[in-house]
């Protein structure tokens, strides 16, 4: 039986890299705030697998889909223990996941099970204001205890936009999205 240490997010700065590498965590922020940049920097610091919720997103980060990395069957949502055990045997310690807003609840459950069974640290990146999983639009994923557990209640919310820093119209449009 597990009792979480905290039911609320504990916020850190993006410069607290070691906190995230030691504990796992969640990096959130709107488009252009540097989530994928941090993922690409941090993946060089640990022995990890990099994945995303969709095939297209996985190509952008030179990774695979979550389903491929831990061998989740797309129909019955079971995973292949042998594939995950091989990650452990290969020395993988971290799983970095991009575009987490589109992950279904059942997959979050599988990932949490994998965390506790095999000891991986998960660092997740995304924007919960983006597209949610089909038929799960009503779920408040940003405050879901399941995700807090997976990420050890460790979070950083990025606010500075870098992608269109020199375009005032895009900056204003971005501010309106909040």
Image: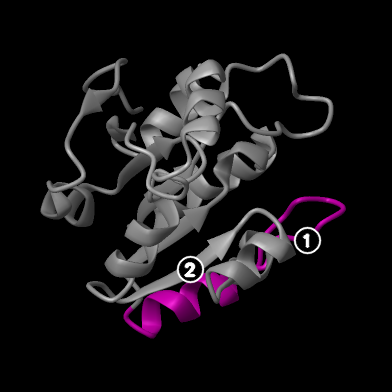
Residue 73: give its label. 1
Query: Do the numbered discs 1 and 2 sit on residues whose CB atoms are within 8 Å?
Result: no
> From the viewer's perspective, is residue 75 above or below residue 85?
above
Mark 1 and mark 2: Cα distance apart in space: 18 Å
Question: Residue at horizontal 58%, vertical 16%?
Answer: 140
The percent coordinates of residue 50 (x first, y second) are 48, 68
How would you rate the neighbour count of disc 1 (Cα within 10 Å): few for under 14, some for 14-19, many for 20 or more? few
Depth check: give the residue in front, 127 or 146.
127
Residue sitting nearer the eye, 169 or 123: 169
Q: Which region is colored magenta?
A: 71-91
> Residue 57: x and y, percent?
64, 60
The residue most toward the right is: 75
Whether residue 58 is visible to the viewer of this picture, yes or no, is yes
> Is 80 drawn above or below residue 74 in the view shown?
below
Residue 10 located within the stretch drawn in magenta:
no
**Residue at x 65% of width, y 42% of height:** 103
Q: Position of residue 65 (x, y in %)?
A: 65, 65
**Which residue appears at 70% of the width and 31% of the height?**
132
Numbered disc 1: secondary structure: loop
Residue 122 vertical position relative to residue 63 in the rendered view, above or below:
above
Judging depth in this view, the residue of 125 and 7 nearest the camera is 125
Q: Is residue 120 visible?
A: no
| Local SS, label 2 | strand
Crowd tier of the residue under label 2, counting other residues whose Cα lies within 10 Å: few below 14, some 14–19, many 20 or above: many
Q: Is residue 78 above or below residue 147?
A: below
How many numbered circles does the render carry?
Answer: 2
Q: Quadrant of residue 59?
A: bottom right
Spot occupied by residue 61 in the image (x, y as percentages of width and height): 53, 69
Q: Is residue 72 rendered magenta in the image?
A: yes
Q: Report whether 97 appears left or right of 152.
A: right
Residue 50's disc is 2
């Amino acid at each position: 039986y597990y009792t979480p240490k905290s039911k609320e997010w504990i916020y850190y700065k993006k410069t607290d890299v070691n906190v995230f590498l030691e504990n796992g965590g969640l990096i959130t922020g709107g488009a252009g705030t540097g989530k994928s940049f941090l993922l690409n920097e941090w993946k060089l610091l640990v022995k990890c697998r990099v994945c995303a919720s969709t095939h297209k997103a996985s190509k952008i980060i030179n990774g695979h889909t979550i389903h491929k990395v831990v061998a989740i069957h797309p129909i019955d949502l079971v995973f292949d223990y042998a594939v995950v055990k091989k990650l452990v045997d290969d020395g993988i310690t971290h799983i970095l996941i991009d575009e987490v807003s589109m992950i279904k609840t059942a997959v979050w459950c599988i990932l949490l099970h994998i965390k506790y069974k095999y000891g991986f640290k998960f660092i997740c990146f995304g924007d919960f204001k983006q597209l949610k999983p089909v038929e799960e639009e009503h779920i408040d994923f940003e405050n879901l205890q399941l995700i807090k557990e997976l990420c050890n209640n460790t979070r950083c919310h990025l606010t500075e936009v870098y992608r269109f820093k020199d375009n005032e119209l895009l900056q204003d449009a971005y501010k309106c999205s909040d």
